[in-house]
Image (cartoon, grey):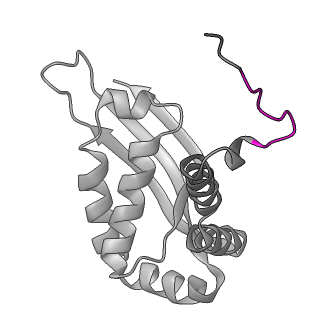
Amino acid sequence: MAMIDTPATPDAAPWTRSPRTAIACVLLLVGLAAGCYDAQALTQAKREQAERMRLEDVDLGKYRITLPKLPHAPVGGVVDFHAFGQVPNRNRKAVEREIKQGDAVLRNRMLIAVRTLTHADVEDPELTNLREKIAKVVNSSLNTDAVKGVGFYDLRFSVL
């Protein structure tokens, strides 16, 4: 008894062969299309980018702080820096005024925060921890979140 083989038509698309395949293809396409972009994330990223473009520098002062000699470190050091904070243009005058009014408190908090740095923090090329600590100190002293970034006009680290 011989079986007759009927070939499939060559022009038939794969999703037309069975309903399950068609449903799977539609679900796959919907899943891919839904994950292409997130409108809220794109809008937030654009807002942050626009805000960064409107940031202005505010002088945070000059500091010369001696780092304590830690038990596991052979030497201490001195961090000498002149920092600026990046604040939105609309907050610049208020931040400058508050920095001048609370200068003694800000300097005290800055001294305490910088003295907690380790040698690894100071040796970091981006100075990420130092920048974050300075921004946190200034924002907590001003009771606001106005300082978005910290930079340095001048920075030196000396080993004692």
Horizontal relation, residue 58 to residue 53: left or right: left
**Is 10 inside the magenta-drawn segment?**
yes
Q: Which residue is drawn at 31% across and 40% down?
A: 66
Q: Can you name the residue that lies furthest to the top here?
A: 1
Q: Residue at x 45, y 81 (%)?
A: 100
Q: Can you name the residue that lies furthest to the left here?
A: 71
In-front residue for pair 36/130: 36
Residue 144 figure quarter: bottom left
Q: In which quarter of the image is the N terminus?
A: top right
Q: Residue at x 43, y 85 (%)?
A: 98
Q: How many labels does the image show?
A: 0
Q: Can you name the residue that lies furthest to the front here?
A: 1
| Image location of residue 14, percent across then percent down | 71, 41
| Image location of residue 97, percent across then percent down | 49, 87
Q: Eyeballing the image, is 119 above or below 86? A: above
Residue 119 figure quarter: top left
In-front residue for pair 21/71: 21
**Is 18 inside the magenta-drawn segment?**
no
Q: Which residue is drawn at 26% across and 20% down?
A: 75
In-front residue for pair 65/3: 3
Residue 140 figure quarter: bottom left
Q: In which quarter of the image is the C terminus?
A: top left
| Image location of residue 105, percent across then percent down | 28, 73
User: What span is in magenta?
Assistant: 5-13
In-front residue for pair 105/42: 42
Of helix, strand and loop, which mostly describes the magenta segment?
A: loop
Horizontal relation, residue 6 to residue 151: left or right: right
Horizontal relation, residue 29 to residue 145: left or right: right
| Image location of residue 157, percent across then percent down | 46, 32
Horizontal relation, residue 24 to residue 68: left or right: right
